[in-house]
Image (cartoon, helix red, strand yellow):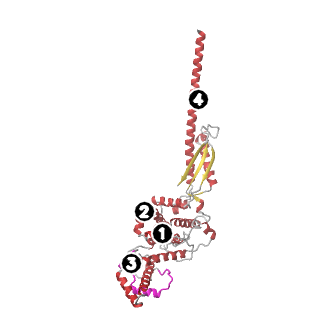
Amino acid sequence: MKHFYKSKKGSTSIFLILILMSMIFVTSFFINAASKLAGNSYADAVLQLAGRSILSEYNIPLLERYGIFAFHAEQSEVEAKLRYYADYSFHNNYLKVLSREREYLDPLKLNIESIHVDLKGYSITDAELFESQILENMKIGFMKKILRNDKGVRPPIADIELKNQKIINSLPSKGYSKGTLDIKRLVDEGIPSIETIRESGSKNFLVNEYIMGNFYNHANGKETRDSFFINEVEYILNGEFNDQKNYKDVRNMLFLMRTGLNSLHICSDSVKRNEIMSLAAIITPGPGMIVTEALITAAWAAAEAENDIRRLEDGKKVALIKKNDQWALDLNNAVKYNIENPDEIEPKNRSSGYTEPISKNGNDYEDYIRILLFLENREIKLLRCMDLIQLNMKLSYRRDFDLKEYYGGFQFETVVHGTKHSYIQKY
């Protein structure tokens, strides 16, 4: 009986020990799982913070002048910085500070086993990324609108030309077509009114307003040079490396636009048509009169267009679609103009050399180049904006500034304690 009692007592002890060991095992399992979960959570927070730290190294002059967030980096450089930031957080923590550099317990034992950064697709010269930053800045009202606050004094005409082939070859638009206007859109939709453009509220409209607010044009240059070109918006429209050629070519675009619109006005005005028919009958009576009518119409429309451009150059307004009281030249003055003026279309004195209509309402020079911007090819327009930013940053910030070396984000993968972590970081 006594032997049986002792045997039963020993079995109970073994059973209790087994239960205790099981509880210890389960507790250890949960502690290990909790430790791993805590480690993953902590590693995730540290790695995300490290990524944001890279983004915080954006170029301040680029942000202040153009509202563009971008950081300068190379792949190996970003990988090294991420590793440094993460390792510091994993091992140089507050617990180590308290231990005063003595041996201390590192319960999470986190180490970066590998790290890989991919910058592809995040260059600020990527049209999609560049446009998204412009749109975001426009929507939150970040743009400084430099030109609206300080139009300055238009500088005298200067022969500014970019000739350095190394700089030309480094421009973001290098290798792209010189074409500008979206001809298909122009044919399908015609010339839009300023009201139509403003009411659209489209990406195109917002990008164009960014351009008008951040780059100079022929109507609002400044004597103090903080940009390479004076006619910057004209460069965006034309893409030549000679400042005056860009303005003259844009002037020709406006001249052709106004000539076409003036021709439509003449054809819709019975009084003007009768004047043309009477003059044509005197010059070439008979079958040839139809050809003469067309020539007189074109000459009258062109003379009025040249008068329109001179008025725009002097800060006046010209209606896109004219009414009779907004028409400046009668037929006699138009004929006289075509006889006295040479074939070349050159900018005239801005304070004289034009005739004023009765009604002076309409659109100014900037409104007209807004129309041209609205019709311009989207990608070429964005790339030429990048050209100007690069040239101006070289001029005012660093001579070796290259926009292709700046990024608006990146993605990276790391393996920490056997667990893979993947992130996309962008502004």
Residue drawn where x is 48% and y is 86% of the image: 341
Could you say which is closer to the camera, residue 5 or residue 223?
5
Q: Is residue 338 magenta?
A: yes
The quadrant holding residue 188 is bottom left
On screen, 409 above or below 27? below
The amino acid on which the numbered mark 3 sits, given as a three-letter code, is His
Mark 3 falls on what kind of element? helix
Measure the C-alpha gap from mark 2 to mark 1.
Answer: 21 Å
Earlier sequence position, callout 3 versus callout 4 = 4
Q: CA distance from mark 3 to mark 4?
A: 93 Å
The residue shown at (56%, 30%) is 27
Quadrant location of the N terminus in the rendered image: top right
**Residue 175: quadrant of the picture:** bottom right
> Magenta stretch?
321-349
CA–CA distance in space, label 1 to label 3: 24 Å
Q: Which residue is mark 4?
A: 25
Tell me the crowding category of disc 2: few under 14, some 14 to 19, or many 20 or more residues within 10 angstroms, Cα based. Answer: few
> Element under label 4?
helix
Q: Which residue is mark 2?
A: 201
Q: Are marks 1 and 3 in contact (CB under 8 Å)?
A: no
Q: CA distance from mark 2 to mark 4?
A: 65 Å
Check disc 4: other Cα within 10 Å, few if <14, some if 14-19, many if 20+: few
Q: Amino acid at mark 1?
A: Lys
> N-terminal of the two: label 1 or label 3?
1
Q: Which mark is residue 184?
A: 1
Identify residue type, mark 4.
Phe
Name the spot of residue 391 as percent of width and height, x first.
57, 67
- The residue located at (60%, 47%) in the rendering is 414
Residue carrying label 3: 265
Residue 20 seen: yes
Mark 2 or mark 3, earlier in chain: 2
